Amino acid sequence: MYTRQTLLVTSFGLFSLFFGAGNLLIPPLLGYNAGDKWFWVTLGFMITAVVIPIIGIMAHAKLQGTMYDFGKKVAPWFSSIYCIIVYAISIAIPSPRTASATHEIAVHPAFGTSPLLTSLIYFALVLVFVLNRSKILNIIGKFLTPMIVIMLLLVIGIGLYNSSLANPATFETPMVSGILEGYQTFDAIGAVVVGAFLIVSINFKTVDVEAYEAKRSLIRKAGLIAGLGLFVIYAGLISVGAYYGTEINVDDSLSNDMQRANLLRGISSSALGTFGNTVLSILISLACFTTAVGIVAGTADYFRGLFNKSNTAYIITAIVGCLAGVAVGQLDFHSIIVIAYPILLFIYPITIVLIILNILSEKWSSPLVFRAVVLTTFIFSIPDVIGFVSPSEDLKTVIEYIPLAKYSLGWALPALVMFFGVNTFQKGRGM
């Protein structure tokens, strides 16, 4: 079996790998806009930013393989393409986004340096950590995560203590807004990437966690603890944005990313005084850095396995991932989110159904069920993507006939109907 220390280190490490740039910046502004409806926004946000990702970790505990295992029941070719797309997205968007957020909030206000210099130093450090693969989880879990959690709780606790009444909500459908904002954290995609990373990290420490059941127990408990931590921090940041955010001057004429940064900076400064900006800079840097390390290492792990456990493939992938981070990291945080959103509308629903299907028992998740549900999800996600990229009157007419499509959730009900339909068909034929 494993020790309590192993469980805590794994849990802290998992929390930190999830908690990156978007996870810190998005909730306060979400709460600010939610106002007195912040509870319902929080509920929606938790579905896509906590519940689905932790179910993904539970699925990894069951499979104990790689991301490839998530989609192999659909077809081997599908799973390979899915893995490459998800890892490419992870390297091209969330990883550079961490560097961009670190520069805009922590580095540039203090030193006035260029984003190129920040990205070069940032990803050089990421590469050092990634190349020391066997030590990553220990370093993050033992040292970096406790610092992140302590600083977050300080900001949230003092902010709520000094809070006032929340403004009226600006969202028409607070819960749906929360669900869609949860997409921006990348946590569901992060679950399949980070979960695979976690399996490899545990395998590096096989002294007390060798048996399948022991690993399954460790991963499931670590997932629950990390999920509880995410829930507390997200709820805290959203409520602080809703209540204490009314004390901060948020310029509505600015872009969302600048509003997010200014609001978080204002909350930190008001809660902790002049020390607040220093705390925020350290907090942003640590939260972003640990996520970038997890993404690059997880991607390198996958390509290492793809090329017969080649360490050369691991090193080359890590270097390419860091170079891509430097290149894309020259964009500002808002530009990266604008690029990311239509991609998320396409890949996120498929990821969600794969996570849910993999956690179910075999009698409910046959290969036929996988294929039918994934295909249905793909088809009904297309209007969401097209509607965001190039909306038209004809498309609006189509969307009116698809339940929940106007909320960019048109795939959900058809996928659910297909799931029960195929299972009923199989049971009727004795399959």
Image (cartoon, grey):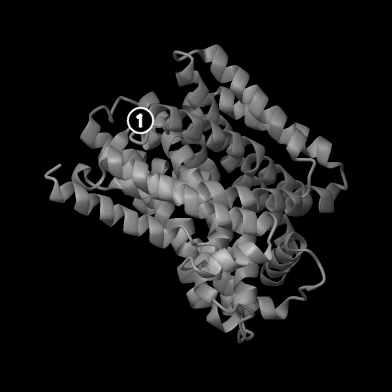
Judge from the rendering whether residue 48 lies leftward or rightward of residue 340; answer left or right.
Answer: left
Q: Which residue is the site of mark 1?
A: 65
Residue type pointed to by label 1: Gly
Residue 257 on image: x %, y %: 73, 59
* Apparent side of residue 419 relative to residue 168 in the rendered image (left or right): left
Q: Quadrant of residue 198?
A: top left
Could you tell me if residue 233 is visible in this image? yes
Is residue 34 found left or right of 43 in the rendered image? right
Q: Give the position of the N terminus as an image quadrant.
A: top left
Count neighbours of disc 1 (C-alpha within 10 A) and say few if under 14, some if 14 to 19, many if 20 or more: some
- Residue at 49% over, 61% down: 410
Q: Using the rendered view, name the quadrant where residue 26 is placed.
A: bottom right
**Above or below — where is 290 with respect to 314?**
below
Decide: is 275 above or below 200. Answer: below
Residue at (71% x, 53% y) in the render: 338
Percent coordinates x, y for residue 398 in the rendering: 55, 64
Residue 109's spot in the image, x, y percent? 83, 53
